[in-house]
Amino acid sequence: MTAPAAEYPVSGQDDIFQMVKGHYTAKALLALWRLGLLSQVGADHDDDLGARALRLGIDLDQIRPLFDYLIVRGYLQRDEAGVYRPTARTVAAAPYFGYFSTMLGAYEPVFARIEDVLTGKLVYGRDLSRSYEEMVRGLTALEDRLMGPVAAVAQEGATKVLDLGCGSARMLTRICQLGPGIKAVGVDHSPDSCATARETVSREGLQDRVTILQGNAAELASLPKDVLAGVDMVSVMFLLHEILRQRGREHVVGLLSEIGELVGPGGRLVMVEVSGTTQPAYRENLLFVPEYELLHEYTNQRLAPREEWEVMVAEAGMTVSEVRPVDMCQAFCLVATPVAGSARAGGSHG
């Protein structure tokens, strides 16, 4: 099933040029963001990008062509003194620059060799993988857009929070700062992420309230029971769709069941996911989602529609208490609570 042909412009050469323009503009902005030249746009009074480049040890003659190109595309401007500064267009886009890493940078290793993936010469997970570092960098930049709903749920009575796939632990430290009695545990499989998370915890002076574990978030039973004791809220953001493809639906339901058993009556699961769509005819009009689904298809992940997540939550013996909006395209924050006396039969999963 495809969208009606009338929805697509027929512009031949202009259509190709538009795609090429978007490619080079995105790559140019991604490069400046990676280098740290756009990290404080809109928040830093020193918007002299040339001076900032010099402080970072970048040769101005090398970067000037990129600056000049972005002037043409409306993202930079140069004053009479030759100083390069961001335009209002760049300032407005700055809160969303993290998408460059999560949507482009993280998947460059795969899509730069996509022909070899398609022909079977290379296999994802064996010969190549996405950049975990780029993914963490992008999600860290976007965390403020994601943390609000999760933190709001935590503020409504949580005493100990477990975050599966904690990344930089910024969310956990923010949650602990909501009240002196809140404790937290963060789990991540990446040693680098755990190191960053511990730095975050130390910087915020929360070592006595936040524990960071390097471990498999998909295997709740493998985590130390004494550390998890007392957890009454579990948060998991953009992780379950990876487990769904790699471990299967049964494993996800089993994991959700274990989460329900861990938090117990009155406890809560807070999951943030991007809803897939089962209506291909309308994907062209869904900003972000078609590309997001494409990336996931070739990196051993699967998005599911929100309705499918709700069914899995119910099968795990929990009920959806509410769904909160998230300031990201097609993302949602689902809050679920265990149903008393409805422990899932055969709760273990393989």
Image (cartoon, rainbow, N blue to C red):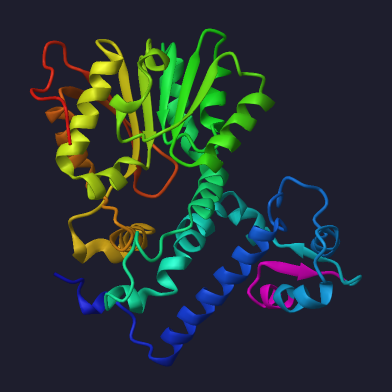
The one nearer the camera, 176 or 108, is 108
Vertical side of 107 occupied by 177: above or below: above
Residue under the point 29% across and 56% down: 300
Residue 304 magenta-drawn? Answer: no
Left or right: residue 182 versus residue 242 is right
Q: Quadrant of the C terminus?
A: top left
Residue under the point 59% across and 56% down: 93
Q: Is residue 320 visible?
A: no
Residue 73 magenta-drawn? Answer: yes
Residue under the point 27% across and 23% down: 259
Query: Residue pushed farthest top?
Result: 181
Query: Residue pushed farthest right?
Result: 81
Residue under the point 41% across and 60% down: 129
Q: Residue 273, how many percent across, how many down? A: 33, 42
Q: Residue 107, how many percent across, how many down? A: 44, 62
The one nearer the camera, 181 or 215, is 215
Vertical side of 307 occupied by 84: above or below: below
Residue 30 position by quadrant: bottom right
Left or right: residue 223 versus residue 245 is right
Vertical side of 58 occupied by 185: above or below: above
Report how many numbered discs are placed on residues in the image: 0
Q: Quadrant of the N terminus?
A: bottom left
Q: Residue 18, how many percent across, how many down? A: 48, 81
Q: Which residues are magenta?
A: 68-79
Vertical side of 92 occupied by 169: above or below: above
Q: Is residue 135 visible?
A: yes
Left or right: residue 186 versus residue 321 is right
Left or right: residue 33 versus residue 84 is left
